[in-house]
Image: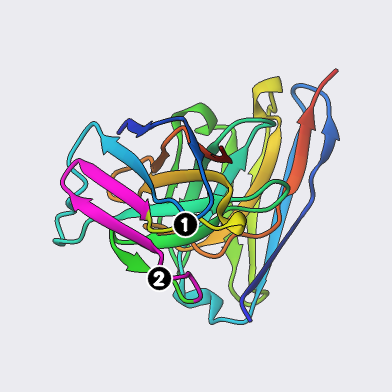
Amino acid sequence: EVQLVESGGGLVQPGESLRLSCVASGFTFSSYGMTWVRQAPGRGPEWVSAITGSGDGTSYRDAVKGRFTISRDNSKNTLYLQMNSLRAEDTALYYCARGTVSIDPWGRGTLVTVSS
Amino acid sequence: DVVMTQSPLSLPVTLGQPASISCRSSQSLVHSDGNTYLSWFQQRPGQSPRRLIYNVSNRDSGVPDRFSGSGSGTDFTLKISRVEAEDFGVYYCMQGTHWPRTFGQGTRLEIK
């Protein structure tokens, strides 16, 4: 069974950093691109970033470019999202998902709250 | 960015009746590789989104055949032939052809 388990969320103040992790199981991790999607409370999903299976290609939405970094460790079957200079508008449930052109499945998410 | 526009935003439906959701994109979703990367997701309260349809019309494993997807270019539709109680929730389309990937604003399927 394919599983994705996110962790690393929490409550931080504006300007602080967090690193999210997503541990994958049930499939050959290195063969798949991976995606981070976020969903603010009461709103629809918003694509954040994606990375190729080898890790040599990445893409970001404009609002997080220069602040967020996506990476992966295929030896650990783990996807990461380093989030720096966090803002209130980054508050959301962050999901990792398998794939980059069509994403499935999604994990259960980890909540990031940015507030003073 | 490609704007995905869903309609209606709210869809009251009686059990056993059909339902149809439209998704229109601001640019063609035909990729240079010839595929059209349009997916549909269902999100029930408190759950992660679940993919139902990929590449316009391919149903995911385990998705009931009452769900179907169609369309081309910039105009796409998700149809439910006969709505069941478990179908209520919010439906989103998503394009995977252009960067950044974008979602529709969602259609809430609710009991009439």
Q: Which tag is nearer the camera, tag 2 or tag 1?
A: 2
Amino acid type indicated by mark 2? Asp
Quadrant in the picture for residue A25: bottom right
**Residue at x 74% of width, y 23% of height:** A15
Judging from the image, mark 2 belongs to the subunit labelled: B
> What residue sits right under mark 1 in the picture?
A51
Viewer-proximal residue, A12 or B95?
B95
Asked if residue B1 shows in the view, the reply is: no
Q: Of helix, strand and loop, which one carries label 1?
A: strand
Residue lying farthest to the top in this orientation: A116
Q: Quadrant of the N terminus of chain A?
A: bottom right
Q: Which structural element holds mark 2?
A: loop
| Residue B20 x %, y % | 36, 45
Provide the chain ID for the residue under circle 1. Answer: A
- Image: magenta residue range: B62-79
Mark 1 Cα shell of 10 Å, populated few (<14), some (14-19), many (≥20) = many
Residue A8 part of the magenta-drawn span: no
- Residue bearing mark 2: B65
Task: Using the image, determine if residue A44 lies above or below residue A106.
Answer: above
